[in-house]
Amino acid sequence: MKKLVIGMLVAAAAFTVVWYRRTNDYKPLGKVLVAGTSADFPPFSYRDLDNTIVGLDIDIVKELANRLNLTLELKDRPFTTLLPEIELGRIHVIAAGMTPTPERAKNVHFTKSYVTGNPLLVVTLAKNPKLTSLEELKNKTVAVNTGYIADLYMSNIPDITLVRLPKLADAFTALESGKAYALVVSNYSLKPYLKELDKDGNKFNTLRLEETDENYALAVSSKLPASFAQDIEKTLDTMQADGTLDALKQKWEIL
């Protein structure tokens, strides 16, 4: 019996080592807060001219780390890999303009939304007829940013050819080059591109998709103690109460 117990313990230890290696440095929460982001989604998370990751989500998670006396470590990953990364324990929170959905909430804890009322817009070139409904996209090619809510929403629209691209900038390139007739993007993410690409306001047309308001929240690892998610939530509440969140949103023109 003693040999059997020892054998079981050895096997369990071996399994643990294998699991640890497969997850590539599982990150227990110590003094470091590991935040996963996808730096291709302005103004929430993107790289500036100095290649520094900036944006509303980044400022929020920096403030959270500061108030919780943690050192922040950012990991820039493709958006579609963030949920698998947090489920494997490689990151503690996701700060990447992520919309809570029932499917996503099966494996992570979502905080209260810190951005609400962010509608989806269909963007087309002004030289083409202005859209009045989604039906006018029938048999057209539409570009979206892979994995975001625009992608999930447009996946349910029949009779269109959906082109999924890893970066929003790629979607604009597809639109401008004629490879896509339209692109679908959230209002707040569209604003920085319009400032850069359409300073005169005569290059693009937009159609607001009613009842598509996006909400953004942080996703917190369910592998960590529940008290950690509670601390995150309480800190966000304090940031809302003392005006910090509103000041950050004003900084990034999310009004």
Image (spheres, helix red, strand yellow):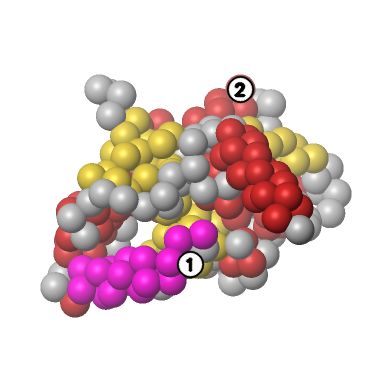
Q: Main secondary structure of the magenta part?
A: helix
- Judge by depth and name the residue closer to the eye, 164 or 231: 231
Give x and y (percent) for residue 140: 77, 40
Q: Residue furthest front?
A: 2
* Place of residue 148 in the rendered image (x, y in percent of width and height, measured from the top left): 58, 49
Secondary structure category for the residue under label 2: helix
Asked if residue 109 is positioned above or below residue 143 in the image, the reply reads below
The three-letter amino acid code for the residue at tag 1 is: Phe
Q: Residue at x 23, y 51 (%)?
A: 70
Residue 177: mark in rendering: 2
Q: Nearer the viewer, residue 177 or 229?
A: 229
Q: Secondary structure at mark 1?
A: strand
Residue at point 61% right, 62% down? 107
Q: Is residue 91 magenta?
A: no
* Residue type, numbered disc 2: Ser
Residue extending furthest toward the left: 242
- The residue identified by callout 1 is 110
Residue 202 visible somewhere in the drawing: no
Q: Position of residue 2 (x, y in %)?
A: 70, 55
Q: Residues within 10 Å of mark 1 (few under 14, many from 20)?
A: many
Q: Which residues are magenta?
A: 223-240
**CA–CA distance between discs 2 and 1?**
38 Å
Disc 2 versus disc 1: nearer the observer: 1
Q: Which mark is residue 49?
A: none
Question: Callout 2: few (<14), some (14-19), or many (20+) C-alpha neighbours within 10 Å?
Answer: few
**Relative side of 232 to 6, left or right:** left
